[in-house]
Image: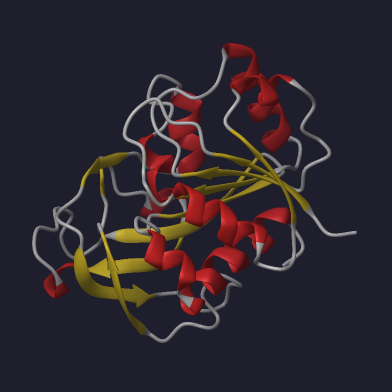
Amino acid sequence: MAPRLLVHTRTTGFRHDSIPAAVAAVRTLGDFEVDHTEEPEAFERPLNGYAAVVFLSTSGEVLTPTGRERLAEYIETGGGFVGVHAAACTEYDWPYYGDLLGARFAQHPAYQPGKAVVEDRDHPATAHLPEIWPFTDEWYDFRTNPRDRVRVLISADESSYEGGGMGDDHPLAWCREQGTGRVFYTALGHAAEAYDDPAFRAHLRGGITWATGVG
């Protein structure tokens, strides 16, 4: 049976135009059954039927207090969690979420081409990528550097684009464990075009697969 995902795209802040393309991409990655919701009440019901929960460019406060409790319990007891792009702009009022994800969004420069440095290719999200991956995105800066709390997979080469704010050590995608659960986050995925890019699709599929515990 294919792993089942709960994909959440609720926004109470900025809403990305790419969300429909992103959801469609996850549905067509080929390895997952997908339930898509924008209802916070979906997290007030049991989550243990899902192999992973995906926050796909969510923003602002998107869960109820009960939903927060359910999600935390789910991850702590072995559930998978995937955050994509603006998932780092989510649940600022919930300290657990910031610790879970590893870092919170601070700002970004203009959408532009740049270079991602693949630091760790021993992971399903990066095994297919070259050491230097040219990409176009918003190159998120974070409030804190998560490196001492996460396994960094990809970082940004700030010399390859204008307006970076983190310097020589700028993580972009990473994974970590929380309780007995697995957490994967990628800052990439701003534009709809990303979800048609075979390399990005494989990056996303690999991250989700890892979070489910399958890979």
Quarter of the image for residue 24 reads bottom right
Farthest residue in the right direction? Answer: 1
Q: Residue at x 20, y 49 (%)?
A: 108
Farthest residue in the top direction? Answer: 65
Q: Nearer the viewer, residue 104 or 194?
A: 194
What quarter of the picture does the C terminus occupy? Answer: bottom right
Q: Residue at x 76, y 36 (%)?
A: 77
Residue 145 vertical position relative to residue 49 in the rendered view, above or below = below
Farthest residue in the left direction? Answer: 162
Quarter of the image for residue 40 reads top right
Quarter of the image for residue 102 reads top left
Asked whether the viewer can see residue 215, the reply is: yes
Q: Position of residue 72 (x, y in %)?
A: 64, 28
Q: Count the marks: how many?
A: 0
Q: Nearer the viewer, residue 149 or 188?
A: 188
Would residue 194 be found to the left or right of residue 136 on screen?
Answer: right
Residue 92 vertical position relative to residue 24 in the rendered view, above or below = above
Residue 121 vertical position relative to residue 185 in the rendered view, above or below = below
Asked whether the viewer can see residue 153, the reply is: no
Q: Nearer the viewer, residue 178 or 63?
A: 63
Would residue 79 be found to the left or right of residue 2 on screen?
Answer: left
Q: Position of residue 1 (x, y in %)?
A: 90, 59
Q: Position of residue 167 (x, y in %)?
A: 15, 60
Q: Nearer the viewer, residue 167 or 124?
A: 124
Residue 156 vertical position relative to residue 88 in the rendered view, above or below = below
Q: Position of residue 59 (x, y in %)?
A: 40, 33
Q: How is the image coloured?
A: secondary structure
